[in-house]
Image: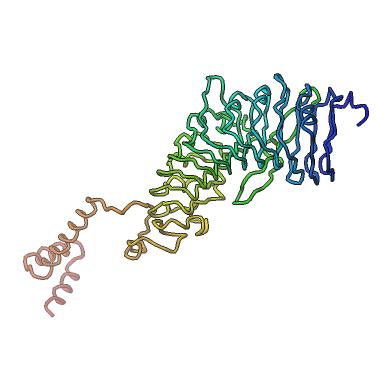
Amino acid sequence: MGNLTNLVYLDLSYNRFTGSIPLFHKAKTLNRIDISNNNGPLSYAKTQLAVLLSLPSLQFLSFQNRRNKLSGIIPDTFLQNCNLRILDLNSNILEGKFPKSLQGCAFLEVLDIGNNKIRNTFPCMLKKFSNLHVLVLRSNMFHWNLRCPIANNETWSKLQIIDLSANNFSGSLPTRYFSSWQGMMLSSNPDQVGSKPLEVQLQAVGIFYQVRVTLTLKGQLMEIENILEVFTAIDFSCNNFQGEIPKVLGDLNSLYLLNLSHNALTGRIPKALGKLSQLGSLDLSVNHLSGRIPDELASLTFLSVLNLSFTQLSGRIPRGNQLQMFLENSFEGNTGLCDFPLKKYSDTEATRPSQFPSDHSEPETIDGKYISFALGSSVCSGIVTWLLLFSPRYNELVDRLLFRIFGQHNIAGRNGNRRR
């Protein structure tokens, strides 16, 4: 490709390139390579991609897009002190194992190898990436559990988006990981909550790259561009995770998207999820959950996507202004659920007086002090009625009282009416 000795930035994206990827071995200063969104198929010899990954100044590498159809094995040739900030190989046909040498890329902020054919256990080396904002491993052949030894300094404190969906992960959800994801927690200082696009700065060249990811929203796969700093997402759907949903998820109070659908989760929906005040999308469908829907979910006023279908939930759907806005299919497949928006109502619904609606999902109870008051009022009314009808002495007392209040004329009128 000629003299590329001083080349810093190469953008060949959104073209119609096919065939073999050029060799860039002379471009020692190359900082950014973007060959995404081409027609494909693209191919490379193992030595070609190995050369790219060994460029000492490389910070950005993207072959993202289904049309590229880049195939082969990711070379295990990352430099020990590589400078990569962004590695995006999404939607290709890459296979083999996860490259162990990637652990040398300690500055990595965005790693997206989703929609490939990588076969491996969870790469525990990623726990060392303290700058990681985005991790996408979706739709590969990863398996086993997420248990990794974690040192005190190995936490994803900046993580905002994690997508492990459509693999074969199993075991329990990683409770201890969730508690360290401070990037999904609202800052106590409102001025620190950013509404700017999520960007990664490439050092030396002063370029800011706006992060884009492909996530499942409203049941559809969507590519999201211009992601804001405040956008956060957890997608562990379509795996084989078991056990209960951790209560600690309620601490991630800036979380916008939570998708745990199509797993083997059991137990109840934690009330702590009601603390996720920024939650806009919640999908817990196709699990083995049980019990009632917590009343606390009715307070999630930002919720625009909800799917609790095909679990084993029971009881009445909590009433309020929020959950009743969703269609019946958000709750279908739960034979024990009842009340609006479902067409099935509880057994007590037909007998409940309509002028006394209840906002509670628990069986209704009546306080004993109201029963005592009602009984006392009835007895007193009976006594007064008996005295008015059958007691002459009581009539004389009433006459005297009325005489003092209204005078002789009204008394006489009353007596005359009585004599008639």
Whether residue 346 is situated above or below residue 4 in the rendered picture? below
Q: Position of residue 373 (x, y in %)?
A: 21, 54
> Residue extending furthest bottom?
420
Whether residue 248 is situated above or below residue 385 in the rendered picture? above
Residue in the image at 60% along x and 25% along y: 125
Residue in the image at 55% along x and 44% along y: 237
Whether residue 305 is situated above or below residue 357 in the rendered picture? above
Residue in the image at 70% along x and 42% along y: 91
Closer to the camera in the image, 112 or 282: 112
Q: Position of residue 185 (x, y in %)?
A: 55, 32
Horizontal relation, residue 211 to residue 339: left or right = right
Closer to the camera in the image, 297 or 37: 37
Q: Position of residue 208 (x, y in %)?
A: 76, 31
Quadrant of residue 182 within the rendered picture: top right
Quadrant of residue 407 within the rendered picture: bottom left
**Count of numbered badges drawn on the protein:** 0
Horizontal relation, residue 350 to residue 213: left or right = left
Horizontal relation, residue 241 to residue 347: left or right = right
> Residue extending furthest right?
2
